[in-house]
Image (cartoon, grey):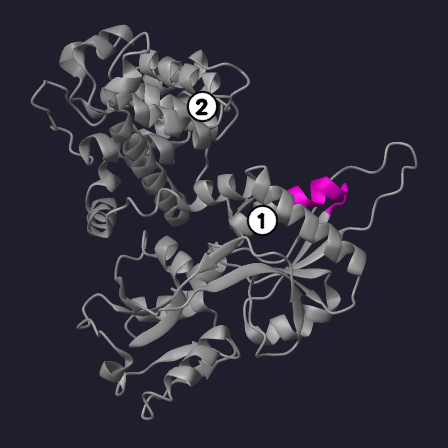
Amino acid sequence: MIQFLRWLLCSGIYISGSNSLALTNITPKPLTILIQPSLTTVYTINNQRYGFEYDLTQQFGKALKRPVKYLLAENKIKFQSLIHKVDFVAGWVIDHKHPPKLTATPSYFTTTPQLIVHKQTPKPKTLSQILNASLEITANSHHSVLLQQQQQQHPQLHWAENPYLSSSDLLWRIREQSLDATLADAHLVSLYQRFQPNLKTAFSFPIEYKIAWGFLADKNPQLYQQACKFITTSQTNGLIKELIDKYYAHIPEFDFVETRAFVRAIKQRLPKYRHLFQKVAKKYQLNWHLLAAISYQESHWRVNAESPTGVKGLMMLTKATAKQIKIKVADRTKPEQSITGGARYIKRMKSRLPKAVKEPNRTWLALVAYNIGFAHLIDARKLTQQHGKNPNSWYELKTYLAKLSDPKWHRKTKYGFAPGKSAIKYVNNIKNYYEILLWLFPDEQTNS
């Protein structure tokens, strides 16, 4: 599984940024950035890079009109060998106890260290309850400093430090039960638990770590000042908040018991219908992972699913919707017809949105319409715009979507009450299912 993770995460390649300068035709020197690859920083699916740090550093490159080059360090040994070859380190958990000494930009994120065990392990409440367990962490890390401090209270505490494995690798070892416990940061754990529900958080340590970009002392002070200004500006203009929302906002609502059920369904039910999701998605130029995620949210991939109101099938189509998209009402429980109906409907919702709504916002707004109707989406967009926010942004729109459940607000709208808060959870659940499917089936063709 460790090999699968390393295959899933990206390897170092050159990423082109801005084009050559229009007047001089001289390519500007690239920013060279060191990152430890993980789901919290940078990863690759279908040759497309994602990740909080990837998005943030790309924006910095655009601001400076410089292309960006990444050097990826999968472990501490490689990290130490590359540190002097880069302009700065992105996604650095501030740690002044280990060389080399780095100077931090303003922090833009905080995280908390957690003790992680396998779900079948009795949940320890303190370190004193794992004195006989195999505990392993990444060598020369902030977790090492933390355990050294904890050892003062627990003299018998012992652990191994591995210079070759990252926190991500060690989480996989917990999953495989080849290791009893490890320390990992909360934001990393929250992402991995979605497709590794065998990971269990025993407890969190009462400490917060700050995350920033790190610069070698006296190496390019001008670039350091530009980075500090960029981070500060990104905090005030909403870029940081929007990226946090993009990658983390839907995590707290996700039920990890439900994750386990989803993983079981992927093994037991999805194989029956996956070829249909792929076939229909290709026909309608959609992403099959998305169609499958919508279907799981609607019916848990149960072909005979039916609500008390008579909504039926894999995509839970109403009679009115079926007629609208030219699916026979009697065919709603037929797998291919139901999936086709769902594809036509989500495609229609996307087509009704203004061209100014770009992906992925276009998909999330279309899902709102799929769930509660396009009219209520119009109301939410108008409320968002009336309050000086961007109605094309899911991050900004969902604040006003939630207000459609409040009489003080929905009385002012054209179409009235709507379960806006439920619609937000609906979208967030689908985002989670969609991302898990992308991670598990990363090389399969997508069409959106």
Magenta stretch: includes residue 151: no
The magenta segment = 59-67
Q: What element carries label 2?
A: loop
Q: Which of marks 1 and 2 is in front?
A: 1
- The answer to whether mark 1 and mark 2 are in CB contact below 8 A is no
Residue placed at 44% from the left, 68% from the top? 167
Between 288 and 317, which is closer to the camera in this rendering? 317
Dot 1 alpha-carbon crowd within 10 angstroms: few under 14, some 14 to 19, many 20 or more? many
> Quick check: can you spot residue 238?
yes
In the rendered view, does 159 fall on the left or right side of 237? Answer: left
Local crowd at mark 2 within 10 Å, few (<14), some, or many (≥20)?
A: some
By secondary structure, the bulk of the magenta-drawn segment is best described as helix
* Three-letter code for the amino acid on which mark 1 is drawn: Tyr
Up the image or down, 430 lies above or below 171; here it is above
Q: Mark 2 points at which residue?
A: 285
As drawn, the residue found furthest toward the right would be 24
Amino acid on which the number 2 mark rests in the picture: Gln
Residue 222: x, y in percent? 80, 56
- Residue 175, x across and y down, in percent: 30, 66
Give residue 57's position: percent from left, percent from top. Answer: 63, 48
Residue closest to the eye, 365 or 147: 147
Q: Where is residue 350 in the image (x, y as percent from the top left)?
A: 42, 18
- The residue singled out by tag 1 in the image is 54
**Residue 17 seen in the current view:** no
Q: Is residue 219 above or below residue 388?
A: below
Name the residue located 41 percent from the left edge and 21 percent from the top edge.
283
**Point 23% across, 48% down: residue:** 255
In the depicted view, which residue is nearer to us: 216 or 435? 216
Taking the view exactly as shown, the residue that stands out farthest to the left is 308
